[in-house]
Amino acid sequence: MTSTTSVTYTAPSSSSSSSSPKMAPQRRSPAIDNLTISTVTSNSSMEIDLRRVSSMPERGGVETVMSNSDEEDIIRKSQSEGAKPLLKLDQYGFISNMDKDGVVVPTTDSQKKATTQNGKNASTTSVEQRRTTKWNIMLNSWSNVMKRRPKLVLKRLRKGIPHEQRGKVWLTLCHVKEQQQKNPGLYESYVNSKESPNKAFLTVQETIEKDIHRTFPRHSLFYDDGNDSEAEMVNSPFGGSLLDSPDRYNDEETERGIVEGQASLKRVLKAYSLHDPDVGYCQGMNFIAGMFLTIVTEEEAFWMLVAIMSDQPCYMRGLFGEGMRETHKVLYVAEHLVHQFLPRLAKHFDKENIHVTMYATQWLLTQYTSSFGFDLVLRVWDCFLQEGWKITYRVMLAILQEFQSRLLQLSFEEILAFMRDLPERIEDGGKLVTTSIHIPLRKKHILKLEREWLAKQDQH
Amino acid sequence: MGSRVDEEYDYLFKIVLIGDSGVGKSNLLSRFTRNEFNLESKSTIGVEFATKSIQAEGKTIKAQIWDTAGQERYRAITSAYYRGAVGALLVYDISKHPTFENVERWLKELRDHAEANIVVMLVGNKSDLRHLRAVETDEAMAFSEQHNLAFIETSALDASGVDTAFQRILTEIYRLMSRRNMQAEEAAAGSSLSAGQTISLSDGGKKKKGCCA
């Protein structure tokens, strides 16, 4: 039996909509006003929990429990609603105690223990610590390192960025600070824009609206327990946006019936649609922007979206624009790479009339965000932001390779059913990304296929 | 996928689910094929697929159903899937009138990309949202008569009408096909089969190998 210390923070009694001139607080540190300390006992012999408990007055008390174990657990509880079960979160902020119908099921203490303890051994911890130190050093002399040792940077990106530094590194890779400095107030002006609502604009906003509730509903940032009529502020360490003074962008009509994370997502997508009216909004972008919001603040998520849409090496706007022209290109490349690298499987797919569009469209179009676990997704993005599409294709090939022996035995319908559940079959997404790096795919392979596709377009 | 014993079937019909984004196509599919409804379903990117077999007039009919992304620009990708489809469920949301107004555009889409004799059923989904109804049943009924479409209202949420919708369209396709087959046979008996009369429905008897345990 170890006793663990629990720190209770109580927010001020004013509601979150009061416009106290809050400075944008530091990311991942909830606003703290009063605190009390109490002691909690735990059966875990492994670790000392540092528990953070925040209670929001309008929610009657929201409890967040955080442990320093391998699978960081955040548990949120609404005390006033009595019977409401605790939300148990994984290290990326997804609710792990939710059944397939989206109902949060109570966690028992034993379950809690099972996930909070199984601590990492000392060596993993020290590896991570070393990695964190290395990244800190790199970040401190970024432009220098990028200029002189780009291969080292790439190598480290491919190993995965330590999660606490991920936001910072991504923002650096996407030149977000520079963009913000060059365009002060631009994001805010899009958000507050009340331009004459023409039909095209309204159609875009309606489409966005439809997708807001359909983006990561199992993530604590976007989870809507269905009984809140006003913006809910979740004191979760996930999602910088929530801590980026939520009052800032709340205008009157905003966010009735949607939670704060959803409201942020809506604003980011609206802002992007105004920034790039030719693309506007295309389904799939919601997953990418939503994923960004779990890592960086709202305005940063917007600028990241701008960067990955219109800058190399990602350059995704061609996929999402009217006609979705480059989606065809990407699928063409993907199809041929499967033939090139997994000929047996490709032959089997051909025989069964399985075409790449049937299973890989959403993988590629959303860079895995729409259906894969974040252990895989974030590792893909660590690389994608620096090296572009090579990682995307590599991971596709690695996934197919992983399940090849199984897929070879299945028929048309079975293959498609298998593909539908495939994301859940991946046990270790990070390992899969690591494996994918060794696939001998070169940039020239991709370029050759892209040129081929382009030539075919010209013929038509 | 759980273990699914592969059934034999007499006919295999390809059906597409089309209609505006957010009208509930994916949930209609999951309600029909798996008896599931997902309140937190995510937007469909590209196409998704499921199958189910039903009995109609003593025959086993297997439906191969393609669910498509609803946003207009996705038609560039999804319209390829209309090819070979013998039926289409054209879905709108009874609580959102614009999704009904767009039905005409979807019909045009079918005319442009699907087989000429595709059977189309208009489906007013979300009938459980009575208090939010924006499209009256009469209005939709009149429209469907005018355009020679079958019509039904469904709720993927409470399951009402869902099985009936699929049952009806599949039965209708079967009848139509039998009639055409018969006409073709008669024609063949009299003279040679006239060109352009081929029936694009794949015939039955095809058995699938193995099962996914």
Image (cartoon, rainbow, N blue to C red):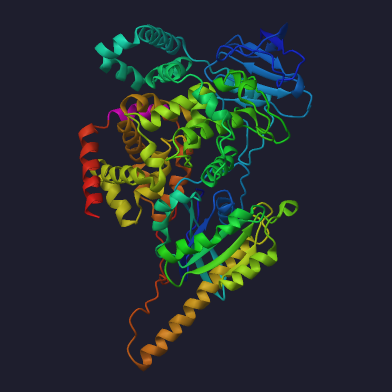
Residue A393 placement, left or right of A304: left
Q: Is residue A432 magenta?
A: yes
Q: Which residues are magenta?
A: A430-438
Q: In which quadrant of the rendered image does the C terminus of chain A lie?
A: bottom left
Residue that protrudes farthest toward the front in the picture: A196
State the image coordinates of residue B172 (x, y, percent, origin top left): 55, 73
- Identify the residue at image location x=45%, y=25%: A303
Principal SS element in the magenta part?
helix
Q: How many marks?
A: 0
Q: Is residue A442 visible?
A: no
- Identify the residue at image location x=53%, y=34%: A270
Q: Where, by quadrant of the figure, is residue A176 drawn?
A: top left
Is A245 above or below relative to A343?
above
Is A119 above or below relative to B133?
above
Q: Is residue A172 visible?
A: yes
Residue A193 placement, left or right of B134: left
Nearer to us in this view, B142 or B9? B142
Residue B142 placement, left or right of A153: right
Nearer to us in this view, A9 or A100? A9
Nearer to us in this view, A49 or A327? A327
- Identify the residue at image location x=65%, y=23%: A234
